[in-house]
Amino acid sequence: MHINRISHGLLAAALSIGLLAGCSSSSDAPAAEAATTTTTAAATTASLSDFCDAFADLGATGGGSLAARDAAGWAENIAIITRLAEAAPDEISAQADAYVTMAHDRAELAADNGYVGVDDLPADVRSAFVSSHADLQAQVNELLAYAGKACPTGSDGST
């Protein structure tokens, strides 16, 4: 599995914010509160890492491609998209859930049409699907744009 690494700057910034958020101007603030805040920042960074790993895996499998795939290929694609959704940051979780729905619907469309590629679907079937899924597709596009900006693309963490 190809794993993208979070850039050192992003990790340092996330941890710094977590450490600063854990500091309090009150001298009687419990130490456990600071530790919880720091742990939460680290968990958020780990979640972004998991999100980006799933995004990289999706790209590696051609998850967004229009090519034909069989039932096993769709199952693999849906599993990766589900992982992506489970790790999605809160601000993009609705769009990630929409992607899971879209993947299931695309898999059903493929199964109903002999697992041909999108370009090989009958024009009326393709058009009806696109029309009925325009709102979902818009959410998927938002998610992919977010992932494209939030996730490093190079093996060295560069974007």
Image: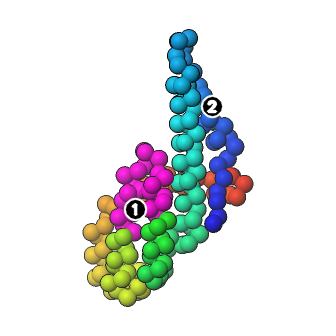
Is residue 97 highlighted in magenta? yes
Q: In the orientation shown, which residue stands out farthest toward the top?
A: 27
- Whether residue 138 can be seen here: no
Which corner quadrant of the image does residue 42 belong to? top right
User: How far separated are the C-alphas under marks 1 and 2?
Assistant: 32 Å
- Residue 140, picture quadrant: bottom left
Write down the residue under mark 2: 16
Q: Give the residue type at disc 2.
A: Ser
What residue did someone put label 1 on? Answer: 99
Q: Is residue 137 magenta?
A: no
Quadrant in the rendering for residue 137: bottom left
Image position, residue 78 (x, y; %): 44, 69
What predominant SS class does the magenta segment belong to? helix
The span shown in magenta is 81-103
- Asked if the residues shown at circle 1 and circle 2 are in contact, with their CB atoms under 8 angstroms apart, the answer is no
Residue 45 vs 115, above or below: the answer is above
Does 90 appear above or below 78?
above
Q: Quadrant of the N terminus?
A: bottom right
